[in-house]
Amino acid sequence: MTTPEHHKVAIVGGGPAGLPLAVILGGQWPVYRGSALFEERYAQLHHLLERHSETLLGLDFRELCNLGIAPADLFQLLHHPGKKFRSLDQIAYTFQDREPLDYILITREEVGGLWNNVPRNLLTLSPGQWMEFGFYPLRQWADENGIDFDVNDLIIKHRLVEYYHSIPERFGQSNRIRTHENVERIEPHDRGFLISTRRVGSEQTFSYTSEYLVYAVGQRCILRQLDAPGADLPFVRSRYDRPEDIPGQRVMIVGGGRSADWAATELFDAGRDVTYVQRQPEARHVPLINDSFHLPYYRRIAEIMRTPSDRWHLHYETEIERIDAIGKGGRVQLRSPGESRSVDVDHVVLEIGGIADYGIFKGFPELSLVDKYDDYRFQVRQMRTHPHNYESIDVPNLYPGGYLAEGIGLVVYAMHGTTYAIAGDILQKEGIVKKVGLERG
């Protein structure tokens, strides 16, 4: 049997939670420098942090939590003391080069995570600068690459993906990142963790061991499946990219989240006959739309819903009973309270979300999970963690990253908010960074 390749840290997942951690462990350490805006708005934090001349990774994060400040919240405030970007010097920390820690990052796609697979023309939910990493502000990236855009505007998918894809080479981390490997199993090992992977699209397998494991695969690791006969027919698609990929006039969208709203709106505006099927009630969908008018496509879907059209059919509290093939398309049998109907379609597009995958952990104590959800349809099973370092309460040296860590909510800059506490905890355990109390800085 081949000896597994060993690393001090293994990061599983290359999205907005795993990728920044790779760069921090790769030697980019945050240091407090303050800024006029941060000092004005958060004077008490400034007085605590200005004593620290060394890296913020050495903070006593447990002490910070005892003061009522979650580590993710602290670094959010340091990076975004104001919601609107004004200039690079408003950011209250900077980064210094240090010796890298031995790590490997494993991802089943290119870095960037789910953003590689969202619809081609999709706008993000937030201004571009909320999606950036502290060590490489979008303004800096744009200036270095001669790109002209306002980082306070909603950023389109391809621009964000370009930014994420540039980071490994820009920070000299490419040789530590293994793309297109799917992690199939994680087990205990006498060196810590044993990770078994398979090359995507082939039978080639690899194995790694590590002393620390960061699990940052996101909340859509496994796409939900439609539990109805006919869901595997060829005209049923599991994701939407752009109208040109959907031949035929009659399209049914099944979902109810933001990606489904986008698909239904874009296909309608492309001239298609759209049937939009949701299990949720109208009373849950409409408030989300009304609360999202800062996004142009939500203003558009509200307009579509207010204007009668024989090309728009929206069904709430409705489920699919079965799908049958008829000619080149099909017929979908729908069931609503007190009513059933059939709809002829050319294509069905499933945008029904996904779930986090904890099933690949084998041989560990049972992981304690907690449901996290809000009124904006954010829902994920999060791993119970210690609040000061985001380490699993069940398995030492296992850290869920980003949205998989307990308490992290649907805030875009929280996607990478766990980065610093995780990196700091590992470096402190290894004796590379000395822990310093807030009052002793």
Image: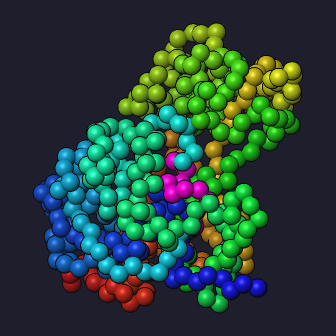
x then y, percent, for residue 128? 35, 44
x 76%, y 85%: residue: 1
Is 175 located above or below residue 218 in the figure? below
Residue 45 versus residue 420: which sits nearer the camera?
420
Toward which corner of the image does residue 56 lie, by quadrant?
bottom left
x then y, percent, for residue 417? 40, 61
Position of 413 compared to 114: left or right?
Answer: left
What span is in magenta?
106-115
x 72%, y 36%: residue: 237
Is 81 located above or below residue 150 in the figure? below
Position of 354 compared to 38: left or right?
Answer: right
x 41%, y 56%: residue: 166
Residue 257 versus residue 54: which sits nearer the camera?
54
Is residue 405 shown to the viewer in this render?
no
x then y, percent, for residue 403? 51, 58
Toward which corner of the image does residue 232 lie, by quadrant?
top right
How would you classify the magenta stretch by its main secondary structure? loop
